[in-house]
């Protein structure tokens, strides 16, 4: 008998232990396609393949499983017919885990190993113990053994997959395919196995790329074994830089996807690797009906240890979620992980990740003998049942590490903030269109474009993209995607303006001409007065009739920036020991502004100062051709304000942090996140605010002789993982404002005047402490949604004036579902109450008359 016939007989008898030759059919820049025919066999068969790069296995065109450095086999059931096998093998890829924290020997080695020619044979053998079918499970399931279950280790299957990092979005699509195919293969092998996956964006990638694999996933979701209940946000977003409205849209779009595709409402925000969490996140989660939160990242703290493995996390308004700080998210159940989990009364996330991959056969075998697959969302349900006994925690979950991510890759942060502002404008214009009853058919295309733009913006908010810690290709891709989003938003705004009355068009503000003096320029518009020196520093800033609130403001300074690890991520303690000031190169009054030319190291730059009629702040714009490497550019302000605390903007709120430097916690916060503004004010509300558009890193320290030094980071120049991060042209806008008798709402309104061009609003608040946080058409087309926030920490009876005729209003949550809370229509006003710091959403319908 010839060898081929003998092999065929072996298959038929189930006596399989041979090599199957693979023939190359084609290749492209990314993949090699290999084919073979698998003869019939009457046993479960294991197909083994060695690759450290990654390969997807299709059987008769359907994704059956995948291979990578940790996954070497796929198990197929018996078949009485031949099956077509196709392997799609990566030509270039990094491992799924064990990736380095910087350049060096490991990084060089991994890149050298990241290219390989694929093997051209496939191992075929009897599956043996690699599969536990349902019949066997029913009679001898290890997990159902009563005498040992109490001692079993609680585990849940997981695979952390960065939507982009040291790989591009296109590579992530393939990683998601392989990860989901591996999970489905293991779910078919072991009926006890449970797997969770967090990001609707990944499900959408698989749905778009591989619809048949997606249907396998849907079947496992329907069986309760592939669990998207932890997919509360569209991606595992950064939670410091995106606006509060962006974070709510992460939740809204995540909910919409999982509800539509799976009939499931997410319950848990599982953000294992995000770089810290503002104090307002539990409030935003509660507003979206998400009751649980988990991370691992605070285990990375470099100074203090977060005290609670499980806790109730309270938001500023008193709302709360059940929180958990797990020990880790990656790898097998090592003995040290088992011991720690037992001490902390928590489950273990098993499965390889960062670059996907997930659970392995050996992890299944561990669970059969010593573990117990648990329902992760169900574990949170049990935790919630005893929430009264859990410790309470209020405040931010500040990560004492990765302090540079508020600044790295300013271009990403600029585009994100630009899109957030444009989306707000476009949504309000479409809400106006809804209010004046532009036909739904005329709006549907613009609403679709708006959703497409939001999906682009939300994807870039992933925690290794927006913070600036990915490879250069990711930022090339992001630039193209942002251009698409900006085009979509511009088309929506233009179309909406043509459908609305001309009375809604905007009016351009006018600048006030500065006056020259011996030392620079003086600005005065009747509201504030400012003196700017010829070197670009501000020596005087005051309200009309008020006192000067700065000793010296707007001093640009450069600092060596060479963190020991995680270069794009970290700014190390002590970076400020050496300072290089900016070098002025001349100044002039021109075009109703004052311009100062500078050298920032070897980088030419200019500062333009401008004061607008009716504005109580001085506008500053820094334009720089940034050429510096491993250098941090900051703007420093010395303020004669008697306070030991500074208030910073947070997503849909504010946070107050100490400016002292006494406790370990205070010393650890030498660089902190804040969005929109930071301000220092005394007990009377008198002080100084700095307003920002797209820069997020701050510092504040009380001075020994009184007063505060407030600093703000503008640019970096990191060299890993992107060797050219931040190089090139930048335009950074901010503003300096004197304050008198100011509250949070005062500064919020100043920022809105600074950041947004004047426009006629559909809803305006007549209550000083309440601001309109968002105004948009309802997702389901039923009226408009207006979101309102109390800023000053006091109960408020709010009157919200509407520019259109209202007929009905009711409270909704962040997902636009009906919720409790009374509201009345009194003439042109919505009238309702707000608790201190509360966020409320309202759905409003309008008259057709």
Image (cartoon, rainbow, N blue to C red):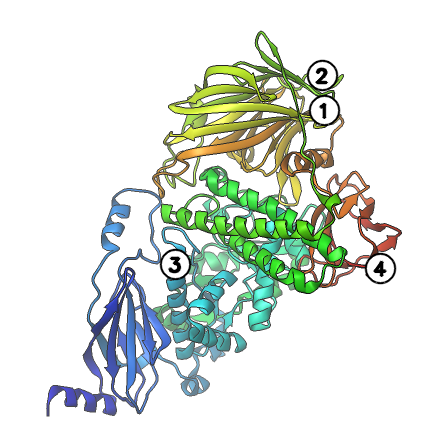
Horizontally, is 84 left or right of 810 in the view? left
Instruction: List the residue tagged with mark 2.
Output: 547
For marks 3 and 2, give the one nearer the viewer.
3
The quadrant the C terminus occupies is: bottom right
Instruction: List the residue tagged with mark 1.
Output: 686
Whole-percent x, y for residue 723 in the image: 34, 39
Nearer-N-terminus badge (2/4):
2
For marks 1 and 4, give the one nearer the viewer.
4
Q: Tell me where residue 44 sits by quadrant.
A: bottom left
Q: Tell me where residue 53 sits by quadrant.
A: bottom left
- The label shown at residue 849 is 4
Q: Residues within 10 Å of mark 3 (few under 14, many from 20)?
A: some
Q: Does any portion of residue 392 appear in the rendered image? A: no
Whole-percent x, y for residue 532 in the image: 59, 16
Q: Does any portion of residue 404 appear in the rendered image? A: yes
Whole-percent x, y for residue 783 in the image: 74, 60
For marks 1 and 3, give the one nearer the viewer.
3
Marks 1/4: CA distance?
Answer: 48 Å
Nearer-N-terminus badge (3/4):
3
Instruction: List the residue tagged with mark 3.
Output: 170
Nearer-N-terminus badge (3/2):
3
Between 371 and 553, which is closer to the camera in this rendering?
553
Residues marked 2 and 1 touching at CB (< 8 Å): yes
For marks 2 and 4, give the one nearer the viewer.
4
Q: Tell me where residue 433 sits by quadrant.
A: bottom right
């Amino acid at each position: 008998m010839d060898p081929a016939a003998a092999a065929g007989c072996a298959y038929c008898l189930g006596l399989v232990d041979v090599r199957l030759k693979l023939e190359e059919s084609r290749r492209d820049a990314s993949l090699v396609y290999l084919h073979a025919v698998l003869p019939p066999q009457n046993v479960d068969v294991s197909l083994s393949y060695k690759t450290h790069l990654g390969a997807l296995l299709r059987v008769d065109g359907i994704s059956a499983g995948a291979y990578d450095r940790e996954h070497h086999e796929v198990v197929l059931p018996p078949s009485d017919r031949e099956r077509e096998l196709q392997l799609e093998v990566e030509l270039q890829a990094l491992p799924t885990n064990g990736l380095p924290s910087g350049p060096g020997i490991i990084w060089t080695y991994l890149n050298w190993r990241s290219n390989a020619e694929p093997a051209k044979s496939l191992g075929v053998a009897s599956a043996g113990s690699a599969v536990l079918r349902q019949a066997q499970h029913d009679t001898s399931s290890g997990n159902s053994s009563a005498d040992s279950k109490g001692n079993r280790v609680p585990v849940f299957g997981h695979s952390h997959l960065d939507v982009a990092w040291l790989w591009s979005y296109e590579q992530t699509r393939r990683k998601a395919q392989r990860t989901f195919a591996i999970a489905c293969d293991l779910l078919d092998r072991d009926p006890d196995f449970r797997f969770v996956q967090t990001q609707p964006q990944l499900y959408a990638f698989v749905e778009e790329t591989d619809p048949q694999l997606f249907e396998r996933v849907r079947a496992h979701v329907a069986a309760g074994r592939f669990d998207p209940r932890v997919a509360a946000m569209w991606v595992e977003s950064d939670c410091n830089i995106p606006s509060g409205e962006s974070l709510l849209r992460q939740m809204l779009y995540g909910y919409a996807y999982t509800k539509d595709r799976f009939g499931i409402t997410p319950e848990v925000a599982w953000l294992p690797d995000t770089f810290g969490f503002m104090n307002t996140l539990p409030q935003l989660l509660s507003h979206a009906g998400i009751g649980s939160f988990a991370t691992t990242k605070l285990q990375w703290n470099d100074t203090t240890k977060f005290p609670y493995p499980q806790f109730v996390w309270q938001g500023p308004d008193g709302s709360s979620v059940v929180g958990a700080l797990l020990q880790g998210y990656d790898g097998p159940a090592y003995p040290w992980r088992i011991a720690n989990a037992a001490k902390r009364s928590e489950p273990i996330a098993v499965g390889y990740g960062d670059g996907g991959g997930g659970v392995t056969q050996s992890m299944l075998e561990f669970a059969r003998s010593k573990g117990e697959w648990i329902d992760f969302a169900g574990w949170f349900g049990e935790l919630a049942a005893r929430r009264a006994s859990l410790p309470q925690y209020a405040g931010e979950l500040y990560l004492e590490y990765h302090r540079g991510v508020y600044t790295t890759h300013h271009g990403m942060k600029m585009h994100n903030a630009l899109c957030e502002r444009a989306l707000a404008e476009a949504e309000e214009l479409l809400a106006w269109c809804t209010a004046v009853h532009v036909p739904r058919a005329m709006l549907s295309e613009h609403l679709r474009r708006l959703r497409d733009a939001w999906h682009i913006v939300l994807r870039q908010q992933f925690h290794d993209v927006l913070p600036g810690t990915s490879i250069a290709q990711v930022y090339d891709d992001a630039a193209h995607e942002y251009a698409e989003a900006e085009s979509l938003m511009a088309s929506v705004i233009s179309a909406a303006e043509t459908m609305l009355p001309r009375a809604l068009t905007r009016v351009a503000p006018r600048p006030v001409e500065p006056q020259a003096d011996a030392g620079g320029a003086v600005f005065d518009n009747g509201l504030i007065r400012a003196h700017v020196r010829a070197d670009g520093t501000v020596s005087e800033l005051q309200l009309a009739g008020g006192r000067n609130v700065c000793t010296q403001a707007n001093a640009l300074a450069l600092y060596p920036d060479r963190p020991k690890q995680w270069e794009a991520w970290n700014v190390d303690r002590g970076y400020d020991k050496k300072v290089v000031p900016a070098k002025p190169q001349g100044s002039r009054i021109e075009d109703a502004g004052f311009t100062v030319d500078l050298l920032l190291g070897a980088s030419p730059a200019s500062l333009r100062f401008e004061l607008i009629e009716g504005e109580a702040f001085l506008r500053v714009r820094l334009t720089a051709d940034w050429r510096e490497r491993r250098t941090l550019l900051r703007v420093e302000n010395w303020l004669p304000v008697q306070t030991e605390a500074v208030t910073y903007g947070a997503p849909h709120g504010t946070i107050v942090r100490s400016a002292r430097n006494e406790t370990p916690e205070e010393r650890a916060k030498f660089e902190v996140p804040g969005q929109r503004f930071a301000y220092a004010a005394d007990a009377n509300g008198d002080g100084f605010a700095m307003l920002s558009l797209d820069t997020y890193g701050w510092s504040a320290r009380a001075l020994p002789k009184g007063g505060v030094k407030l600093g703000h980071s503008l640019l970096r120049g990191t060299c890993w993982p992107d060797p050219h991060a931040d190089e090139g042209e930048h335009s950074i806008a901010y503003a300096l404002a004197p304050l008198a008798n100011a509250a949070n709402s005062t500064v919020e309104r100043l920022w809105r005047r600074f950041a947004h061009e004047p426009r006629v609003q559909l809803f305006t608040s007549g209550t000083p402490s309440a601001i309109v946080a968002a105004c948009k058409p309802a997702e389901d087309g039923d009226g408009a949604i207006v979101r309102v926030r109390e800023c000053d920490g006091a109960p408020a009876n709010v009157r919200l004036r509407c520019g259109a005729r209202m007929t009905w209003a009711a409270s909704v949550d962040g997902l636009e579902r009906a919720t409790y809370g009374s509201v009345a229509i009194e003439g042109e006003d919505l009238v309702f109450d707000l608790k201190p710091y509360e966020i409320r959403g309202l759905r409003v319908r309008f008259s057709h008359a």
